[in-house]
Image (cartoon, helix red, strand yellow):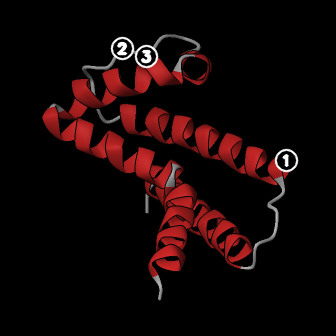
Amino acid sequence: MRTKNYLLLVLVALSILVSIYEGLLYWYDLETSESLLQVCHFIFIVLLVFWVDSDSKDHPEIYRPYEYRYLMFLFWPVYLPYYFCRTRGAFGLLALSGFAGLFLMSYLVQWVIYAALTTAP
């Protein structure tokens, strides 16, 4: 497997583990560790930047300056939509929404648990 596939696998695994953690704590009405969640979100962003850096090597239409990874890390909210639209066209917005779904998966799990608990008879 290539590096970008490993990074993507770790990104998905991290999202699933954080979602399980937050979902279980929400189910038992316990507080989550905010510092742990901030670290997990930071790691997610770093892994996403590394994945984009690894993926951009396959796309010659992307100009990679000397400090490409550092610039991506600083400007990732602006650069990610541009990158996905530039490399994948309309499908890139779908891929970007998939990464956003991974980032927000733990909140979606909590919302589903809340909806299930409030609609139960």
Whether residue 107 is visible, yes or no, is yes
As drawn, the residue found furthest toward the front would be: 121
Q: Give above or below for 104 relative to 67.
A: below
Q: Which residue is mark 3?
A: 64
Nearer to us of marks 1 and 3 is 1
**Residue 4 place in picture, x, y as percent:** 45, 50
**Residue 52 place in picture, x, y as percent:** 45, 35
Q: Is residue 47 left or right of residue 52?
A: right
Whether residue 10 is visible, yes or no, is no
Q: Is residue 1 left or right of residue 67?
A: left
**Residue at left offset 55%, top offset 56%:** 107
- The amino acid type found where label 3 is placed reads Arg
As drawn, the residue found furthest toward the top would be: 65
Q: Give above or below for 76 relative to 71.
A: below
Q: Give above or below for 79 relative to 104.
A: above
Any mark on residue 63, and which?
2
Q: Which residue is mark 1?
A: 35
Distance CA(mark 1)–CA(mark 3) = 33 Å
**Pointer 1 local density, CA inside 10 Å: few below 14, some 14–19, many at least 20:** few
**Residue at left offset 34%, top offset 26%:** 81
- Discs 2, 3 touching: Cβ within 8 Å: yes
- The amino acid type found where label 1 is placed reads Ser
Return the disc, 2 or 1, that comes first in the chain's sequence: 1
- Discs 2, 1 touching: Cβ within 8 Å: no
Q: 4 or 84: which is nearer to us?
A: 84
Q: Quadrant of the N terminus?
A: bottom left
Q: 70 or 23: which is nearer to us?
A: 23
Dividing the picture into quadrants, the one containing residue 27 is: bottom right
Return the disc, 1 or 3, that comes first in the chain's sequence: 1
Element marked by disc 1:
helix
